[in-house]
Amino acid sequence: MFCEKLTEEQIRKVMNVISDDGALTILKIRTYDKSFEDAVAVSAVPEVTAKFQEDIETYQLHDYFIRGKNRAGAGSDYIYRKMMYEWFGEPYVVKYLMEY
């Protein structure tokens, strides 16, 4: 719901902040624009393919957490939710509190 509204610039900010030392090189950002290809996709969340040192990993940005953050810094989900709150405001927090 909220993660689908993230711009490429916002996604880049998230990825730079959650990496421990900013050593994450973003190779590809896949966002969904409601095209036919996206309609048949299993997932409708933004995906980021990034290189951390020698490893290439794929991260999926969901509304309240990031999947695939094995190399991301500690507290990544908290930082991510804080950034989402700054961008989407009170409706984001209310929805989070109602679901969790």
Image (cartoon, rainbow, N blue to C red):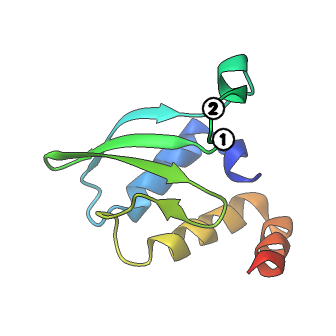
Q: Nearer the viewer, mark 1 or mark 2?
A: 2
- Residue most toward the left? 54
Mark count: 2
The amino acid type of the residue labelled 2 equals Ala
Disc number for residue 71: none
Question: Are circles 1 and 2 on residues that touch, CB within 8 Å?
Answer: yes
Q: Residue at x 70, y 44 (%)?
A: 4
Classed neighbour count for the residue bearing mark 1: other residues with Cα under 10 Å, few (<14), some (14–19), many (≥20): some
Q: Residue 91, relative to residue 47: is it above or below?
A: below
Q: Quadrant of residue 100?
A: bottom right
User: Does residue 31 appear left or right of residue 16 in this picture?
Assistant: right
Indicate the position of residue 1 as horizontal and vertical percent values. 77, 51
Question: Which type of secondary structure does the marked residue at label 1 adopt?
Answer: loop
Q: Residue 35, relative to residue 90: is it above or below?
A: above
Q: Nearer the viewer, residue 56 or 40?
A: 40
- Residue most toward the top? 36
Mark 1–mark 2 Cα distance, whole angstroms, equals: 7 Å
Write down the residue under mark 1: 44
The answer to whether residue 92 shows anywhere in this view is yes
Q: Quadrant of residue 20?
A: bottom left
The amino acid type of the residue labelled 1 equals Ala
Indicate the position of residue 33 as horizontal and vertical percent values. 70, 27
Q: Residue 78, relative to residue 80: is it above or below?
A: below
User: Does residue 1 appear left or right of residue 51 in this picture?
Assistant: right
Write down the residue under mark 2: 41
Q: Residue at x 36, y 77 (%)?
A: 74
The answer to whether residue 33 shows anywhere in this view is no
